Image (tube, grey):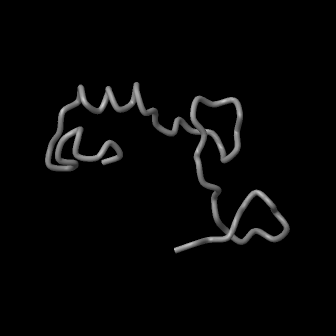
């Protein structure tokens, strides 16, 4: 899970209150495209792809 062991055991169960604490104090990505300024927390990494001359997409790393 995104909040690691402090919230519980991932798919095997967890503690909802700890997940809420993580959400409040650490924050989570709330949508919006890469570099978007009008969202609470934009994605921190650019999307990857090969789309001609479109500069929005970066190199794919794997």
- Vertically, is 5 above or below 26? below
Q: Is residue 50 left or right of residue 17?
A: right
Q: Residue at x 64, y 65 (%)?
A: 48
Direction left: furthest residue = 12
Q: Is residue 12 left or right of residue 50?
A: left
Residue at far right of view = 53
**Percent x, y of residue 20:** 32, 27
- Compared with 27, 57 (above or below) is below
Q: Residue 53 placed where, x, y %?
A: 85, 68
Quadrant in the rendering for residue 18: top left
In the rendered structure, the answer to whether residue 25 lies left or right of residue 19 reads right
Across and down, in percent, residue 51 comes to: 76, 68
Q: Residue at point 66% right, 47% down?
A: 34
In this rendering, the answer to whether 45 lies above or below 18 is below
Q: Position of residue 36 (x, y in %)?
A: 70, 39
Q: Quadrant of residue 42?
A: top right
Residue depicted at 29% across the width and 33% down the height: 19
- Above or below, comparing residue 59 to residue 10 in the picture: below
């Amino acid at each position: 899970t995104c909040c690691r062991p402090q919230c519980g055991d991932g798919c095997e169960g967890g503690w909802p209150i700890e997940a809420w604490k993580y959400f409040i104090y650490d924050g989570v990505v709330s949508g919006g495209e890469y570099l978007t300024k009008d969202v609470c927390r934009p994605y921190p990494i650019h999307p990857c792809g090969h789309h001609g001359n479109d500069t929005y997409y970066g190199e794919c790393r794997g």
